[in-house]
Image (cartoon, rainbow, N blue to C red):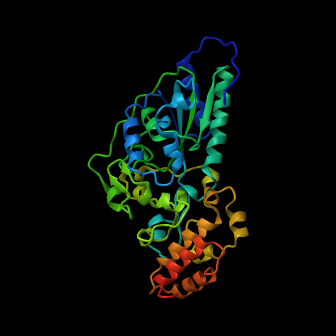
Amino acid sequence: MPCENQTQAPLDAAALVHQIRRWGAELGFQKIGISDIDLSHAEPRLIEWLSAGFHGDMDYMARHGVKRARPAELVPGTLRVIVARIDYLPPRAADSWQVINDARKAFVSRYALGRDYHKVLRRRLQRLAGRIEAAAAGYRYRVFTDSAPVMEVELAEKAGLGWRGKHTLLLTREAGSYFFLGEIYTDLPLPVDRAARNHCGTCEKCIDVCPTRAIVAPYRLDARRCISYLTIEHKSAIPQELRPLIGNRVYGCDDCQLVCPWNKFARVSAEPDFGVRNGLDEVTLTELFAWSEDEFHARLLGSAIHRIGYERWLRNLAVGLGNVPRSAPAASRVVAALRSRSEHPSALVREHVAWALERHGRR
């Protein structure tokens, strides 16, 4: 939010950056970097990506267009972007591959096992911005936490926080990719950090492991095929040809991160807010499918999952239940669970339940 202009002493920008990094560490951020606002190198790729329709039905991306690559058009007067990283890998969470390989269980992307990161990160960034305001009265700023057309990976790369991996996520040598990013757009003329170098080399494990082949080329993602998009952003029916490939991934997908060699350096988060809630790290599909709408809201209020709503939550679970092998010991319980929702008021839920029942040889 912009602050009122006030008379202030000459700014010692280098000293302020040192203070910003110290304050960031005190507030729980693992790293702070400063970027300029020249994203002209990324703008052609953005236009090409949008023209290919890879954004799917995320219409807001096309609506904002090149504004994503022009920070000063998004927030007039912006000169620098302060980029912050906070690790989220929850402690004591069940092994991801063990959950993915157990068709009875529901896999939830590890970033969503705890409290909604939007709220946690925004609160911390606002506190950091407040400290900067006290030291540089009259500066203007705006905080972003995945809440506006911000090219956060490009900005983080320029700020020295890491490099864009071939799966399109930011990677860093000391912490892999299990972290959130947040930004403060500011008119302060701060010294910028040196951009990070790419260390992916010839590795393409993330491309090879993608269940739906959504990474169509290095650094190029077709969101329409991405399981994270399909289970979170996509609002209508999931394409039938992709449903069997989703497996038991009911909210997001971490496969490309799980195989990345750099994630052997991923750090467990010390943030209580990112700890596992409601046993979501290894709960069964049938248990989640049995939740009433009231239970869904009561248990997941304050979680990132709550944003998709109960209807899409059941849609995703129905797909997971449809992918449980017929020969599995729990197959009879799966069929009973699906039948309990076969007359659900939502046409979207009924359609996915019907598909799942057919997969089990039932109508």
Asked if 285 appears above or below 69 in the picture, the reply is below
Q: At x 37% / y 33%, what residue is drawn?
A: 41
Residue 142 appears in view? yes
The quadrant of the rendering that contains the N terminus is top right
**Residue 210: quadrant of the picture:** bottom left
Q: Looking at this rendering, what residue extends furthest in the left direction?
A: 202
Q: Is residue 139 left or right of residue 215?
A: right
Residue 104 appears in view? no
**Which of the pair 116/337 is nearer the observer?**
337
Asked if 360 appears above or below 225 in the picture, the reply is below
Q: Position of residue 132 (x, y in %)?
A: 64, 26
Q: Position of residue 28 (x, y in %)?
A: 60, 41
Q: Number of numbered discs present?
A: 0
Q: At x 51% / y 85%, what residue is drawn?
A: 331
**Residue 185: quadrant of the picture:** top right
Q: Position of residue 95 (x, y in %)?
A: 48, 65
Q: At x 37% / y 37%, what residue is drawn?
A: 44
Q: Is residue 7 left or right of residue 149?
A: right
**Which of the pair 222/335 is nearer the observer?**
222
Q: Is residue 273 left or right of residue 104?
A: right
**Which of the pair 294/192 is nearer the observer?**
294
